Image: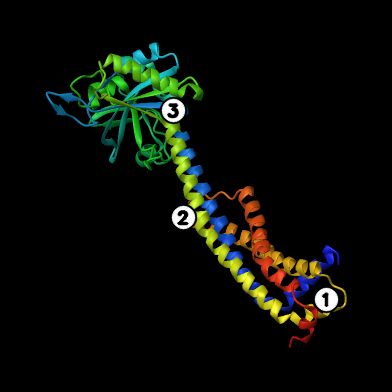
Amino acid sequence: MDFLQTIKISLRALRTNKMRSFLTMLGIIIGIAAVIAMMAVGSGASYVISQQIASIGSNIILVIPGSTTSGGLRTGGGAQTLTSDDVKAITSECRSVSLAAGTVRSTGQVVYGNLNWATVITGATPEMFEIREWGATAGRSITQQDVDSASKVCLLGQTVAESLFGSADPVGNIVRIKKIPFTVIGVMERKGQSPQGTDQDDTIFVPLRTAQRNLVRSQHTNNIGALMVKAKNEALLDKAEEEINSLLNQRHRITNGKEPDFTTRNLSEILAVAQQSSKAMSLLLGAVASISLIVGGIGIMNIMLVSVTERTREIGIRMAIGARKNDILMQFMTEAVMLTLIGGLLGIALGAIGATVVSKILSWPTLISIQSITVAFFFSGAIGIFFGFYPAKKAAGLNPIDALRYE
């Protein structure tokens, strides 16, 4: 008996008991649908994390102030231990670094006309925008001349611009930041959420020296709140981090055994950890969903055993007219595999629909890859082979005479 004929006989047998065949496939359908949907949600989460990290910039090392000890008292991470001179030193002395920029941050109320908005105020230099690959969609960006002259100009993030000006063009208007008038010179490109979940567009940028002198309370106007460094390329990130640590330890007189008063963070490492966590979560979700596939496989094995019992006389007749044991084995194996493959196809379609519904309801991106569909399809076939083998072997092992006598 050729393979094509075996498939035809198997399909005819499945159509004979349509409802039972569907209920048998239901476990596989639900299992495959769950795996596809969960993997899509996990892939979407990984994509979101990658986009959020990418929105900060590439090849970036962040240096933030650490703790200091004075008179036996240890202060926390809010201590101001970095200066603009550190930025200049890193730019000139660290060979693996292409750009460095200092920033200061504050919060305050911004007023335009009878409207006001509480936001983050960031003092920055032109290098910061280049490091973060962040340009202006309207007007211009902050220049070095603005920084050197401590000009009272500002750039609005998209959220602030929309909150204060709506659809109108803010460029050229005067806003008051902490009661000080600033001229709006531009509006920044939209960046979206940061990896921490904060709105990166809810901010105003002013020249660094302007912020240091007028907007940030500090004992020394040379202090900065954080330092952003861009390595020349991704391969030099670790080398750049080593050079920065070595230089700042030397400048800040950090001797052996003394705790550094700064901390460096490699954003690429943060991305790798976040993606690894997301991948692990996707695999965990997929593994949990796969349990229903095992349950579905057991259901198929039980139904196939029932089918063998019901069709014992038929098996005996087929053997009596010349069917070999391999023919009987192949027929029942084919029926089991057909059940799981059809269920797998229906499950893939249901999983894709489910992922789309989740994406629409929760506004969460879901990514269905060809790889996950292919794996799910072949895995469903493997379940049919694994759980269908025992019933098929039992059918093929029946004694023809005993099978013909079976009532």
For disc 1, the neighbor class at 10 Å (few under 14, some 14 to 19, many from 20) is many
Q: Residue at x 43, y 27 (%)?
A: 60
- Residue 244 placement: quadrant: top left
Colour convention: rainbow
Question: Would you name the residue on which mark 1 appears?
Answer: 319
Q: Residue furthest top?
A: 92
Q: Is residue 95 above or below residue 104?
A: above
* Secondary structure state at the residue bearing disc 3: loop
Looking at the image, can residue 130 be seen? no
Q: In which quadrant will I find the N terminus?
A: bottom right
Looking at the image, can residue 338 be seen? yes
* Secondary structure state at the residue bearing disc 2: helix
- Residue 407 placement: quadrant: bottom right
Whichever of callouts 1 and 2 sits on the residue coming sooner in the sequence is 1
Place of residue 265 in the rendered image (x, y in percent of width and height, measured from the top left): 37, 29
- Residue 207 placement: quadrant: top left
* Residue 362 numbered tag: 2
Depth-wise, is mark 1 or mark 3 nearer the camera? 1
Q: Amino acid at mark 2?
A: Leu
Q: Is residue 259 above or below residue 357?
A: above
Question: Would you name the residue on which mark 3 appears?
Answer: 132
* Residue 117 numbered tag: none
Whichever of callouts 1 and 3 sits on the residue coming sooner in the sequence is 3
Quick one: 381 or 302, which is closer to the camera? 302
Place of residue 406 in the rendered image (x, y in percent of width and height, measured from the top left): 74, 86
Q: Is residue 15 above or below residue 246?
A: below
Q: Amino acid at mark 1?
A: Met
Quick one: 63 or 290, which is closer to the camera? 290
Place of residue 30 in the rendered image (x, y in percent of width and height, measured from the top left): 57, 65
Place of residue 104 in the rendered image (x, y in percent of width and height, measured from the top left): 29, 26
Horizontal side, residue 350 vs residue 119: left or right = right
Distance between the alpha carbons at the discs numbered 1 and 3: 76 Å
